[in-house]
Amino acid sequence: MKNVAVIGAGTMGNGIAHTFAQSGFKVQLIDVSEDALKKGIQTIAKNLDRMVSKEKITEQQKTEILNNITPYTNIKDGVDSATLVVEAATENLELKLNIFKTLDKACSESVILATNTSSISITQIAAATSRPERVIGMHFMNPVPIMKLVEIIRGYNTSDDVSNTIMELSKSLGKIPVEVNDYPGFVANRILMPMLNESIETLYNGVAGVEEIDTVMKLGMAHPMGPLQLADFIGLDVCLSILNVMYDGFKNPKYAPCPLLVNMVRAGKLGIKSGEGFYDYAESRKAEKVSTQFLK
């Protein structure tokens, strides 16, 4: 299994492509947007430059890694030689179902179809295909080249053979795979997202400010990053999407997104990706608190 197609050249997609290419895989990076592909490969190159500067890899190795990645804007062409496809598109159920229907028709029966979804049911995604036993979740953590964990999520019909293959494959990438079952949010986000949501509620209720909440969690709980800063890093739209999936799946009020989070996403304040979230990431105003207008 040395030919891998990755669907989506965004933050997670280019990170997954980087990780596979660095481990010697031939990667077909697929995105409908040529601009997204260009930006994704530029991001990989910049990350490799940092590794060269830290003497973790050589310039020659950087070139070899980049040469392992081939961009495509067409799914059918991109998956032609793939033995594994990893979908890393936006966290949107309808989009993912459409992608998997397309992949099912474009790929041979032996190809394993994996999704990097952080919350959506693997069983539901697999049901859009004629090969549910060969569909599995590979939930990488951001930033993918650095973070060791991969949540391996078995759908209802995922075969033992496919699960074992993906577990071993993850180890070959230098990752530590953990197998979990298919319930909303899986393990990582089922635990993480309510904590982030409660942190946002704490701000919304005026208990403390952004920096104060993050400082308490960093110094008091030894978290490397405060919860509000982490939410900005993940993307507030992604956090909202995951909470909505869990709320719909469990029908439990504890997963209901905080109104402040909803309003910020509506206002386009998505965190690092938009330049402002709970902190302001503009060059001239690093780490300033978000405007109080969004607390209403």
Image (cartoon, helix red, strand yellow):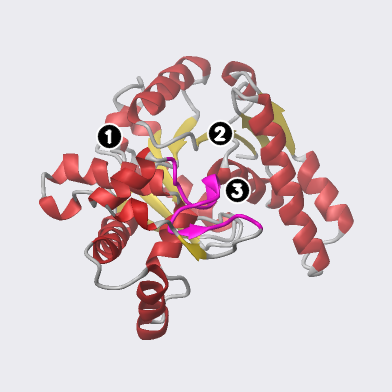
- Left or right: residue 114 versus residue 171 is left
Q: CA distance from mark 2 to mark 3?
A: 10 Å
| Residue lying at 11% horizontally and 49% vertically, measured from the top left | 252
Q: Which residues are magenta?
A: 268-283
Q: CA distance from mark 2 to mark 1?
A: 21 Å
Q: Secondary structure at mark 2?
A: loop
| CB within 8 Å, label 1 to label 3 | no
Residue at mark 3 = 15
Residue 218 point in image, percent of width and height: 42, 78
Residue 141 visible from this viewpoint: no
| Residue lying at 52% horizontally and 57% vertically, measured from the top left | 280
Residue at mark 1 = 123
Which amino acid type is shown beneath numbered disc 1? Thr
| CB within 8 Å, label 2 to label 1 | no
Foreground: disc 1 or disc 3:
3
Residue 176 point in image, percent of width and height: 48, 62
- How crowded pointer 3 is (Cα within 10 Å; few <14, some 14-19, many 20+) is rated as many
Residue 46 point in image, percent of width and height: 75, 52
Which amino acid type is shown beneath numbered disc 3? Gly
Q: Who is closer to the viewer here, 133 or 102?
A: 102
